[in-house]
Image (cartoon, helix red, strand yellow):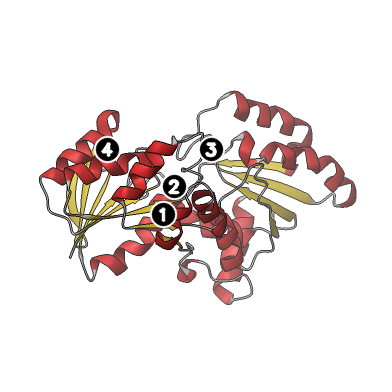
């Protein structure tokens, strides 16, 4: 069977720039490619060739400026049995027209069927063109079927996860060694380490964690807040919000550490380094991958 995975226009696959969807695709790819002919579409990246076959998987990287149209053109020239569209329901009809004989599965990672994202007519058209919808949580499923009850029979919750081999718990010899190494790297060997991991945006709430440090340090003067992430995946440049965070952190000096962007391979080490992880999201978080990562590492959250 010929499968196509179609990433969003945000980040490339493999996950050289990070990204929850791209990391999940990297995780499941070996299982699919061992049984099926798999092609993965994503945007171009300077570090990746436009076309390559790696470990039996075909990667096609297309220009971001007209990505969806370029994908549709590729679909017309191929013959996929099943097309998996990641988190972009409004592209489904275009892809179905380009490859009418393919079955389409749509996975949802956010509230993409809300009134803010699409009209009622657009939602109906999407449902006419998909064979199945998967969601990352029961919450996201409910956002679909509350507006479109007819979608209930084809909407399934498929929870994401982590590779446990990459997250040796802190009570194992390997996990303990990683913990010691990374605490030394950041100069926090004898500290109580609070970890934030994610994009630096108001909806993720790191500013609230910085505000909380005043009271935390009154009771725990050896506490340190480690803020891991940048304003965007693999982007360490500053915007107004990141500057605001750094200004907020100035009075706390060494008690707040900004790591900037952390490559996907290093993420497990940060969770092993921490004493507690805080998911401070200030919105209806669909189901943050970081919660799985903390649990896998054995880090309280």
Who comes first in sequence, dot 4 or dot 2? Answer: 2
For disc 4, the neighbor class at 10 Å (few under 14, some 14 to 19, many from 20) is: many
Q: In the rendered structure, are the residues bearing label 2 and label 1 in contact, judged by CB atoms less than 8 Å apart?
A: yes
| Image mark for residue 19 | 2
What is the CA distance from the residue labelled 1 to the residue labelled 4?
17 Å
Foreground residue among 149 and 220: 149
Q: Is residue 225 visible?
A: yes
* Residue 248 in the figure: left or right of residue 20: right
Q: Position of residue 29 (x, y in %)?
A: 31, 62
Pointer 3 residue: 230
Q: In the rendered structure, are the residues bearing label 2 and label 3 in contact, judged by CB atoms less than 8 Å apart?
A: no
Q: Is residue 280 above or below residue 28?
A: above
For disc 3, the neighbor class at 10 Å (few under 14, some 14 to 19, many from 20) is: many
Pointer 4 residue: 44
What is the CA distance from the residue labelled 4 to the residue labelled 2?
15 Å
| Image mark for residue 23 | 1
Q: Nearer the viewer, mark 1 or mark 3?
A: 1
């Amino acid at each position: 069977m010929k499968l196509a995975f179609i990433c969003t226009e945000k980040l490339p696959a493999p996950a050289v720039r990070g990204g929850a969807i791209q990391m999940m695709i990297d995780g499941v790819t070996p299982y699919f490619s061992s049984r099926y002919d798999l092609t993965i579409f994503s945007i171009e990246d300077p570090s990746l060739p436009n076309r390559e076959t790696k470990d039996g998987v075909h990667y096609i990287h297309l220009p971001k400026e007209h990505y969806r149209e370029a994908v549709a053109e590729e679909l017309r020239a191929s013959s996929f049995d099943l097309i998996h569209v990641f988190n972009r329901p409004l592209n489904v009809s275009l892809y179905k027209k380009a490859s009418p004989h393919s079955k389409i599965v749509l996975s949802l990672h956010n509230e993409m069927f809300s009134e803010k994202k699409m009209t009622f007519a657009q939602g109906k058209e999407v449902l006419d063109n998909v064979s199945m919808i998967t969601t990352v949580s029961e919450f996201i499923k409910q956002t679909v079927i509350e507006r479109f009850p007819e979608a209930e029979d084809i909407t399934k919750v498929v929870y994401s996860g982590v590779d446990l081999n990459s997250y040796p718990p802190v009570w194992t010899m390997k996990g303990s060694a990683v913990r010691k190494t990374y605490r030394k790297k950041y100069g926090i060997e004898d500290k109580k380490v609070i970890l934030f991991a994610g994009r630096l945006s108001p909806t993720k709430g790191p500013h609230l964690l910085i505000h909380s440090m005043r009271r935390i340090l009154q009771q725990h003067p050896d506490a340190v807040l480690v803020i891991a992430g940048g304003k965007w995946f693999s982007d360490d440049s500053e915007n107004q919000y990141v500057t605001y965070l750094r200004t907020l952190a100035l009075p706390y000096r060494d008690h707040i550490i900004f790591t900037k962007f952390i490559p996907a391979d290093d993420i497990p080490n940060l969770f092993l380094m921490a004493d507690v992880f805080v998911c401070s999201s200030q919105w209806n978080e669909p189901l943050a991958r970081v919660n799985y990562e903390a649990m896998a590492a054995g880090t309280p959250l």
